[in-house]
Amino acid sequence: MDLNRRDLLRLGAAAAASLSAVGCAELTATRRADPAGWAGKSTGAITRIPTMCQSCTTACGVLATIKDGRLLQIVGNPEDPNSRGSVCAKGVAGPSILYDPFRVLYPLRRVGPRGSGQWRRITWEEAYAEIADKLKDIRERGHPEEFAFQQGRNRSADIINRFLDSYGTPSSFNHRALCSANRRAALLATVGDSDWDLGDYEHTDYILNFGCNWTEAMQGHIPIVTRIMQARANRGAKIVTFESRLSNTAAVSDEWFCVKPGTDGLIALALSHVICTEGLWNKAWLDRWSNYPADEYTRHLAPYTPELAERESGVPADTLRRLAREFAAKAPRCTTTSGRGSHAHYNGFYNDRAITVLNALVGNMGMEGGFCWHPLSTFDTKKQFPEPAPVPPKPTAKSVIADAKQWPLANAWNRMKVGEIVYLWIKERRQKISALMTYNTDQAWSWPEMQLVQEVLKDEELVPFHFCLDVMMSETAHLADLVLPWTTWLERWDIDARPPLGLIDYVGIRQPVVAPLGESKDVREIFPELARRIGGGMEQYFPWASVEEYLEQRYASVPGGFAFMRQHGAWIDPAKKPNYQPYERPLDAEELAGSSTDPQSGVITKGEDPKTKKPAAIGIVMDGVAVRGFTTPSRKLEVKSEAIVALGRGVDKVIEPLPVYLPIPDLAQGLADDQLIMISFKWNVHNAHRTMQSKWLMEIVSSNPAWMHPRTAKRLGLSQGDWIEVTGHRPRAGDVPRADGSPVGSQRTRVHLTEGVHPQVLAFSHNAGRWMGGPIAAPGSAADAWVPAPVGDRDAARVPWQDALRVPQNSLIPIYPDPTTGQQAWNDTVVRVRKA
Amino acid sequence: MARLSMLIDLRTCIGCHACSVACKAEFDVPLGTLRNTVKYVENGQAPQALRHFIPVLCNHCEDAPCTRVCPSRAVIRLDGGQVVIDKDRCRGKQECIEACPYGAITLHPDSHKAQKCTLCVHRTEQGQAPACVEACPTKTRIFGDLDDPGSELARRLAATPTVAWREHDGTRPKVRYVDTRGALPLLAEQTMNPRTQKQRR
Ligand code: SF4
Ligand code: SF4
């Protein structure tokens, strides 16, 4: 029968039609001349323009398919050495972001009270005039620091810093503390060279993942996950994940352990304990490169037994022993990954210190297939692609908020700052703000204690003038005086690159693939214009006639220059080699000329460090050979860091020199029956507020119910889909502002029961809960008066997720900085839950 | 005649939905209808709880019920074995939508004609992979001709045991999966699009 059937199919329509009489025929057809019914969009007279995605901060190289001036499709750019032709859904969704029917496309001025949603369309001329007037006045009064700049994660640091520096304001507030400060600080303290580890995933055999969700989020997302999946397919690499929730990364792992939040560091210490006590370490490597004797570290680890880790984290002691042995057996082709699961905690800095040192124990540091890094977090801004002169000097004015002193590791290496305290400190009038510019972020929705941010933004005394540049009417734009229409990443220019997973730095380009829609503009156009209008010397730092002219200068060292970049999208110097074992590189005669060596430590110094005004270390003599070493004070891998102790002492804080487990004070006190630990997570199809403008991404995830374990639900008398009221609390203990246990806010939502979450945890996604921006981003909301009638997209009128749950989870989360770095402890909120 | 098909290796799928969104972009698939998506299913109990990602699309069945029920004979099979809707002939009667056990066909809300996956025939006949295959970052989806023993698809199929979604239904689905964790049975009677009731005009 089968064969006959297939044969019939091959006979074509005539034979099939003759069978239709018996009711089982199918019709076959050869390809018809008119393909209208079948054709999709990406064939025919198309052009493909290379650019770089910015739906997240990974900045994958992409190709934009253009037909008749319209963007149809985004695919990966195989010439990008980091993403190598791969993209994720957020990149592919480019057209829905560009053609979002609810974009803001014209400058708007508020006409009612702030936050009333009443706007008038104005011209750019009017907007420029008003802003320049205000900023000029502030600057001429001699208080440039009263102009504050709030940015999200952006890829235009060159032009932004040029503008802020030439203006003279140090009040540049960023998001780093809400993001990754702990991990970065842990690396800087331990390894020195870099604030971002890049495991050599493609060549690894074993990955211990501490709460890093690289299948869904994470700086490096697609370049990381494609390499890890390649290692799995080609080398059978094993992946083990510790995470309080079944993330998609946990789901693709060979083993997943559902750990209690905040215990990742203890797990790493227990694994280290097994490795040291069983002698599974690379003793020769440690003897050469650790600044702390291996035996002493073993003694330090004595209390951190697998049994203690089992009690605290829930991972069985025997399993921890097995994992430690497996990990060490694969060395040096083994590595860790860590993310907000490990470091967005009150104890996050120590957690990531312990994880970093775990790698050192098995000697995988900088090895092929091991724990690697690259000194550049972007393209080479110093030698290869320098800033065109004249470059403005750094501001001399001071910002109390940007320099917040009580978190000693926040600004110790890089200026990471403590983002979550900005609005609290403005409210407390610690620093006067006369004008605020919001750029590429939505702090009124995405900051912890967002109610407080809203309250401050609404207050015209605290923030007398606020202008916001964004692609949509964000919750923050809604609280501005002027809203300026920003270009999407598909309409703007950048010179860009990200930490290279291939361990060789490169450079890429972001270029407009279509002309900016409406009257949208980018900072590369806005800032030079404002500088000219503010004057007072600012204008001299923007001498180029166009963005293209500026970029021509910047790409001068690329063979083929700007034109090559526009055609290919990325360039990598073929002469460069992967950054393996940078610490073993011998110093050459030129480097050593004029240097001196400390006879005791072997540290080689030359000249003066401009920051510390002390002799600048350039290497270390090891067994008689001058090598580069680690870029730490000891030029070794710092298991023990005296530097962090000293930084703490400077502000009367005790910072432990060795990796330790610091129990989270509130959790150590135990939880009542109706209390859970709230953790926050991101979905793969979303990034920040921006991705919620995409109809295609929102169609996949638009809702954020509270994930709860069925056992917990039973205890609380809840069933799948039941309504609950969740109340978030400030911590009751610890070195945190306002640690009084008071409630932050309450929300109603439904429970989603799943085995994929820890029984003591309530997990909320960050990717829902907006109330501005139109009915795609904010289900159930009406399009506001500012929105031009949604034309050209019939989907705008049939959004199916109008009933989606939308819980602004940041209304539950307190301002909760790690006492060392100031990193926000996103995953330590104690919530009370009751049936509603 | 070829037997064009797809192999989906669930071992490397990360559930990212690049494939689903690529399909949306390629055909401007209206909100509320899907031609291609990724199902998430969970099973097991902690600490062994699992989540599986299962990309689904029309199976271009070799014994396709949708092709037999259309009063306008608009559901046709192309030379490559792709089952497609002839838009000119379709009069929106929706018999095919009812007939497909996978819920792979939906009514286009603007044209009121049936729409479904074409295996990107407009691309493949120009030597390009289907949009979802091109979009996949982990190369989880392999497109090719089952009858071409030299194709990567055929080689991979020969080397690895594969299964199809609801193979027992007897429609002879052509999309094959490498499913080492036994995920497909968990899709049970789920469909791509919730089964649409006929709304005859
Ligand atoms: S990982 Fe980030 S940069 Fe890369 S394609 Fe996805 S959204 Fe774009
Ligand atoms: S694009 Fe590939 S990895 Fe992503 S969900 Fe689809 S099949 Fe899976």
Image (spheres, rainbow, N blue to C red):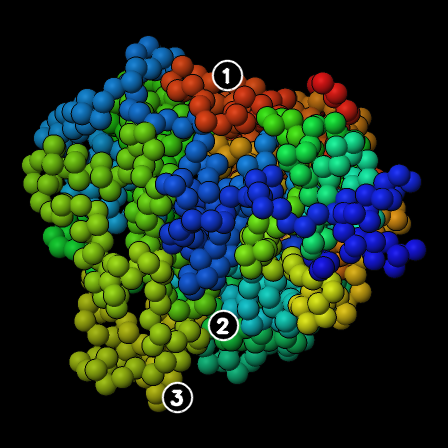
Residue under the image location 51 percent in, 69 percent down: A200
Check whether the beta carbons of the residues at disc 1 and disc 2 lie within 8 A of each other: no
Residue A555, percent from left and from top: 24, 60
Task: Give the distance between the C-alpha atoms of the residues marked 1 and 2, in whole angstroms.
Answer: 54 Å
Task: Give the distance between the C-alpha atoms of the residues marked 3 and 1, in whole angstroms.
Answer: 72 Å
Marks 3 and 1 belong to one chain: yes
* Amino acid on which the number 3 mark rests in the picture: Asp
Residue under the image location 40 percent in, 28 percent down: A103
Residue A406, percent from left and from top: 36, 43
Q: Chain of mark 1?
A: A
Q: Helix or strand or loop: what does disc 3 sit on?
A: loop
Task: Find residue A334 and report its image quarter.
Answer: bottom right
Residue under the image location 54 percent in, 56 percent down: B126
**Does residue A590 appear in the picture of this structure?**
yes
* Residue at the disc numbered 1: A782
> Which residue is nearer to you in this view: A660 or A251?
A251
Q: Chain of mark 3?
A: A
Does the beta carbon of the residue at mark 2 sit less than 8 Å from ligand 1?
no
Which of disc 2 and disc 1 is earlier in sequence? 2
Image position of A689 with respect to A501: above or below: above
Give me the disc on residue A365.
2
* Amino acid on which the number 2 mark rests in the picture: Met
Does the beta carbon of the residue at mark 3 sit less than 8 Å from ligand 1?
no
> Which residue is nearer to you in this view: A759 or A480?
A480
* Residue A630 left/right relative to A698: left
Q: Quadrant of the N terminus of chain A?
A: bottom right
* Residue at the disc numbered 3: A623
